[in-house]
Image (cartoon, grey):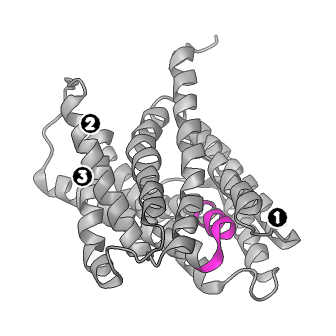
Amino acid sequence: MTPAPVTAPRSVRRGLACLAFAAITWGTTGAAVEIVYRSSDFGPTALSFWRFLTGAALLLAASVVRPARKLARTPQPIGRRVLLFAGTGVGLAVFQTAYFASVRDTGLAVGTIVTLGAAPVFTAGGGRVFLGERVGHGGLLAICGALTGLAILVLGNQQGVVHPVGVAMALLSAAGYAASNLLGRWTGRHGTGEDPYTLTMGSFAVGAAVVLPLAWGEGLLPHTADPGHVVLLMLYVATVTTALAYPLYFAGAGAVRAATASVVMLIEPVGAAVLAVLFLGERLTAATVIGTALMLAAIAGLAVAESRPNATD
């Protein structure tokens, strides 16, 4: 007997469209930030601060005008709510700031590929260690493939093509993403999950507060010969790739399987690499292409492995 579909086809198509839009726009974030770096003396923590602050403000404004949704929710312990918002905010602060630093130090293509290639691996490993989630042979093979791709990308290039500090920042960024993701899984498992819209808005507010001291020391306002150009780029990052893309991502992720969402989001690193080559003058060496292909294939394999939690492979 064929099981009845869990999600209506129309909802799935809508979810896929939301995920694709989020992935495409996120793929442009690093390019916009790279142009800001070339046009001003803005630093990564200042960029993160303004992105978080503006994104939170826009989401707050949208929450006032959007229709209220009456959802039955179990009262949540205040301690776990504080842990969820604080932990997710700190994780996102590390994720965004370290990613922006990686783009500055080693370029858009490599920084994005390493960050998004390592994040699912860290998440899978953390899920196994801290949440007791099963990885399986397929998951282990995918993790090994991702690590091999990373090694080829970093060690197979000549000195100066891939910068170790930038790669380290990308790995730190991936760790921040994985930490916030795992915290969300843990709270959801204990029945203390949060509305994605509210969680995003609150986490952005926490992230802005966390990076503010560093951003203040780095310089909140940039020195640039073209301030209008920089402001427009930052508004694009804060509105389209943040306040709009994050809720769409959560909406899409809630409508399709996690494995499907992981594969669709591969659009992001591919799009970032294309923009880096076509418009920012970056070049992809053979080692970079091979390493990238292995990492992306590993993510797809990991998504397939995670979609079969009861498999005995």
In the rendered image, residue 67, in percent from the top left (x then y), is placed at 23, 23
Which residue matches tag 2?
Answer: 62
- At label 2, the amino acid type is Ala
Residue under the image location 44 percent in, 77 percent down: 43
- At label 3, the amino acid type is Gly
Neighbor class of circle 2 (other Cα within 10 Å; few <14, some 14-19, many 20+) is few
Q: Quadrant of residue 103?
A: bottom right
Give the camera-side residue of 217 and 133.
Answer: 217
Residue range in magenta is 105-116
For mark 2, give the secondary structure.
helix
Lower sequence index among marks 1 and 3: 3
Q: CA distance from mark 1 to mark 3?
A: 38 Å
Residue under the image location 40 percent in, 47 percent down: 239
Which residue matches tag 3?
Answer: 202
In the rendered image, residue 146, in percent from the top left (x then y), is placed at 70, 64
Q: Quadrant of residue 86?
A: bottom left
In the rendered image, residue 49, in percent from the top left (x then y), is placed at 33, 66
